[in-house]
Image (tube, grey):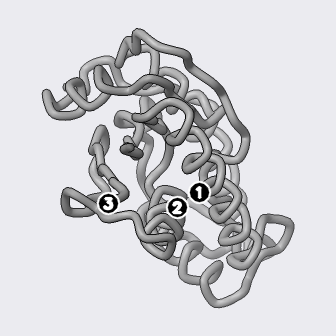
């Protein structure tokens, strides 16, 4: 039995620059609405891992769905809301004068989220609970199908990986957050 967590390809939404909190909210919405860059090469190891899968589960976000299309799985593909990315809160939305680079907003927003700022998005505790449910589903599918691949998102994959390790699954490759990276877990 094997569970493979594959991060989606590089997003086609690559706008950068200094933006306000309101513009950051628009940036997040655009990032979630876009698919992936067609020029982003897929590592051979990820292609090989996808070929081993007997079932593929994907997040409903376009960048994950488009990644599955590029990976061309020859097996059952199931879209599942459980595997969507962890939400990003928008801190300081009322401060119209504040401008930060996009990358700094991303770091700052995630840090605020870890510290408990949620403002209309899923909390850390809720994300952990969702990851536990996702882990249980993956283990069930692994018993039924053998090798399961999930095409999803970096943050949520971290949460799911931790839950798999808590249940005795062993990571067979190092964790990385790069696009197209395939991280495998097996049960002895």
The quadrant of the image that shows the C terminus is bottom left
Picture residue at 42% right of the left edge, 27% below the top: 36
Residue 16 relative to residue 64: left or right: left
- Give x and y (percent) for residue 55: 50, 25
| Helix, strand or loop status at disc 2 | helix
Label 1 to label 2, Cα distance in Å? 6 Å
| Helix, strand or loop status at disc 1 | helix
- Give x and y (percent) for residue 126: 76, 71
Picture residue at 83% right of the left edge, 73% below the top: 119
- Give x and y (percent) for residue 99: 55, 70
- Give x and y (percent) for residue 4: 37, 43
Residue sitting farthest toward the right: 120
> In the image shown, does 147 or 98 lie closer to the viewer?
147
| Helix, strand or loop status at disc 3 | loop
Q: Residues within 10 Å of mark 3 (few under 14, many from 20)?
A: few
* Residue at numbered disc 1: 135
Q: Quadrant of residue 187?
A: bottom left
> In the image shown, does 155 or 112 lie closer to the viewer?
155
Decide which of tag 3 and tag 2 comes sooner along the chain: 2
Picture residue at 24% right of the left edge, 33% below the top: 46
* Residue at numbered disc 3: 188
* Residue at numbered disc 2: 160
Decide which of tag 1 and tag 2 comes sooner along the chain: 1
Q: Nearer the viewer, mark 1 or mark 3?
A: 3
Marks 1,2: beta carbons within 8 A: yes
Q: Nearer the viewer, mark 3 or mark 2?
A: 3
Label 1 to label 3, Cα distance in Å? 16 Å
């Amino acid at each position: 039995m094997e569970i493979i967590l594959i991060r989606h390809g590089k997003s086609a939404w690559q706008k950068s620059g200094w933006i306000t909190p309101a513009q950051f909210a628009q940036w997040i919405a655009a990032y979630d609405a876009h698919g992936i860059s067609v020029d982003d090469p897929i590592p051979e190891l990820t292609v090989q891992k996808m070929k081993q899968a007997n079932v593929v589960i994907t997040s409903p976000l376009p960048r994950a769905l488009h990644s599955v299309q590029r990976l061309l799985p020859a097996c059952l593909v199931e879209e599942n809301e459980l595997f969507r990315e962890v939400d990003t809160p928008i801190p300081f939305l009322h401060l119209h004068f504040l401008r930060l680079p996009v990358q700094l907003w991303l770091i700052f927003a995630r840090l605020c989220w870890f510290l408990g700022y949620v403002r209309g998005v899923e909390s850390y505790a809720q994300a952990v609970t969702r990851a536990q449910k996702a882990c249980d589903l993956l283990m069930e599918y692994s018993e039924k199908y053998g090798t399961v691949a999930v095409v999803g998102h970096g943050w949520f994959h971290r949460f799911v990986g931790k839950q798999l390790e808590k249940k005795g699954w062993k990571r067979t490759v190092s964790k990385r957050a790069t696009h197209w990276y395939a991280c495998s877990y097996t049960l002895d």
